[in-house]
Image: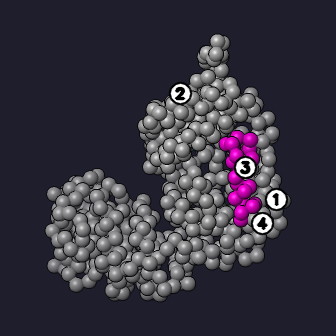
């Protein structure tokens, strides 16, 4: 194993590259999408990691990557302090691809001219391909690409050939005449670029000559090795939420550390039906981890009694969770590390939220939301990964499909689905109805067709009729959404027959409910949860 310096260049971020494995490095010039490029390469079964933009040529030679990709970035190559690579890197004769700013850097170093273009170009545009082989293999002559740039390569040295152009950008794609060096002014990594994944695959396979033999299991081996080196003989605590991310972290750490892992699961009395048991089954019976299930339901429910304001409820739950977790963690000897299931999208989102309006809409809380003051060093083995990669890792680690495909469940749990004041009776009704809805969804083959589905208890009662009598009982709402990223969402077009089955079974079997409604609002203007 050889270590690679990542962008942050701190020991925590020292990663190891598997030997005898094809490697592609993404040099990060400050791009929002560097990790996305890496993920697209990993989709080709080639190990790929994001590294600092100025990783030394010497280190690169040591790692011996099959290819290098220069990411985009916000700078202009002519800015005084614009990020520059180690120039010796161009002598290594490694295939290279520059994207946007990365292309401008490549072309400038190899003698071409980069100028501010007449107009900034941002968004979708049509691109005409001149040369369909090699880099553009399997791609039509005309395709839609995503541009986002100010400068552009203008007056190419005779060393470069134009492979594709748009109406305003004659050098939308270029190839060096003699070296395996390519440049794209547009962004192949984003989904707005048609067949962008194919272009990256062509670079990796056709230009770099990668065979694509890497598997997620070698990432597991790599993480296990680096966790063991870092932890030594200390104890690691992992907070379990019952969700995919924290479960994958726990399974990975268990494989790396065995009895040096202690998991804490806080039962806050706001969980869904059977949730605590399933965590216990998985981590105590199956994995045999040192699992601490803290039943704090009475504490949570008593503190929440009489509180109906959503933000107050969230605050109370967040604070109690930290208190309970901290107390339990103190009972664990020799614990120096806290493992969290932070994923790459969480890193971007929390960064964006800090300055954006999103943070003020709801104060989200989850297991990842523990404060720094707990005094542990953090272990975040999923920090570079996207959700689908985490799922693959989980399956490889032996977690059941059902857990891997579980819909997200918010940290404050049923509290934000029981609108207004929470009480044991309303929670009972909600739990039963939610379990029925999920069961019907699964039976009808719809569970995996929606990204999140749940039942909400409304703080109203409605009049109904049962037998010959009048009833005055709970109203429940069913919510199901389709979404790519949970930032926006559309209500799911569930079949009427399925809605009928859900409604009938709930009203027939859950005492105290006489009406079920279906939520047909999208986000925005609604949010996914009701509180
Ligand atoms: P909203 O309701 O903001 O939800 O559209 C977007 C996604 O976030 C989940 N969510 C939370 N997750 N702690 C969490 O861990 C929270 O406090 C929280 N609030 C909402 C929600 O379930 C959806 O998946």
- The disc, 1 or 2, on the residue closer to the chain's N-terminal end is 1
Secondary structure beneath dot 3 equals helix
Residue 88 location (% of width, % of height): 37, 85
Q: Nearer the viewer, residue 217 or 40?
A: 217
Image point (67%, 36%), residue name? 432
Q: Mark 1 points at which residue?
A: 330
- The disc, 4 or 3, on the residue closer to the chain's N-terminal end is 3
- The disc, 3 or 1, on the residue closer to the chain's N-terminal end is 3
Residue 146: quadrant of the picture: bottom left
Secondary structure beneath dot 4 equals strand
Query: Of tags 4 and 3, which is closer to the observer?
Result: 3
Q: Name the residue under label 4.
A: 335
Image point (65%, 30%), residue name? 509
- The numbered dot on residue 68 is none
Q: Are marks 2 and 4 in contact (CB under 8 Å)?
A: no
Magenta stretch contains residue 507:
no
Residue 15 location (% of width, % of height): 56, 75
Find the magenta span and give its range: 267-287
Q: Name the residue under label 3.
A: 276
Few, some or many residues within 10 Å of mark 1 (<14, 14–19, 20+):
few
């Amino acid at each position: 194993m050889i270590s690679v310096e990542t962008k942050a260049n701190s020991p925590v971020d020292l990663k190891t590259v598997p030997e005898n494995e094809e490697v592609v490095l993404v040099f990060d010039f400050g791009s929002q999408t560097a990790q996305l490029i890496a993920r697209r390469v990993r989709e080709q079964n080639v190990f790929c990691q994001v590294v600092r933009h100025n990783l030394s040529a010497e280190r690169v030679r040591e790692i011996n990557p099959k290819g290098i990709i220069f990411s985009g970035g916000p700078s202009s190559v002519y800015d005084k302090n614009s990020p520059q690579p180690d120039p010796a890197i161009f002598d290594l004769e490694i295939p290279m691809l520059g994207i946007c700013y990365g292309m401008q850097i490549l072309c400038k170093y190899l003698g071409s001219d980069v100028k501010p273009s007449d107009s900034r170009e941002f968004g979708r545009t049509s691109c005409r391909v001149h040369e369909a082989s090699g880099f553009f293999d399997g791609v039509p002559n005309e395709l839609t690409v995503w541009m986002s740039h100010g400068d552009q390569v203008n007056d190419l040295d005779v060393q470069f050939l134009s492979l594709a152009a748009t109406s305003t950008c004659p050098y939308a794609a270029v190839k060096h005449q003699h070296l395996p060096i390519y440049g794209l002014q547009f962004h192949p990594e984003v989904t707005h670029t048609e067949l962008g994944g194919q272009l990256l695959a062509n670079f990796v396979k056709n230009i770099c000559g990668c065979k694509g033999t890497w598997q997620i299991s070698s990432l597991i081996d790599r993480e296990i090795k680096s966790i063991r080196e870092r932890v030594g003989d200390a104890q690691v605590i992992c907070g379990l939420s019952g969700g995919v991310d924290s479960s994958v972290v726990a399974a990975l750490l268990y494989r790396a550390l065995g009895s040096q892992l202690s998991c804490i699961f806080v039962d806050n009395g706001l969980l869904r039906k059977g949730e605590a048991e399933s965590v216990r089954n998985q981590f105590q019976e199956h994995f045999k981890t040192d699992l601490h299930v803290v039943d704090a339901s009475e504490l949570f429910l008593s503190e929440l009694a009489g509180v109906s304001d959503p933000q107050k409820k969230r605050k109370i739950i967040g604070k109690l969770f930290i208190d309970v977790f901290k107390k339990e963690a103190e009972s664990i000897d020799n614990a120096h590390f806290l493992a969290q299931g932070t994923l790459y999208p969480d890193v971007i989102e929390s960064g964006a939220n800090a300055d954006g309006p999103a943070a003020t809409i709801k104060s989200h809380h989850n297991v990842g939301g523990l404060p720094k003051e707990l005094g542990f060093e953090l272990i975040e083995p999923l920090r570079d990964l996207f959700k689908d990669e985490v799922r693959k890792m989980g399956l490889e680690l032996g977690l059941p499909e059902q857990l891997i495909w579980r819909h997200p469940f918010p940290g404050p749990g049923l509290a934000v689905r029981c609108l207004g004041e929470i009480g044991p009776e309303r929670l009972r009704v909600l739990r039963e109805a939610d379990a029925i809805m999920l069961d019907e969804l699964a039976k009808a083959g719809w569970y995996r067709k929606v990204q999140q589905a749940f039942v909400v208890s409304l703080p109203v009662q409605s009049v109904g009729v049962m037998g010959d009598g009048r009833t005055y009982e709970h109203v429940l709402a069913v919510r199901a959404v389709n979404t790519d990223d949970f930032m926006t969402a559309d209500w799911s077009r569930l079949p009427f027959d399925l809605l009928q089955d859900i409604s009938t079974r709930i009203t027939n079997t859950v005492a105290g409910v006489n009406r079920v409604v279906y939520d047909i609002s999208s986000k925005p203007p609604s949010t996914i949860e009701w509180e």
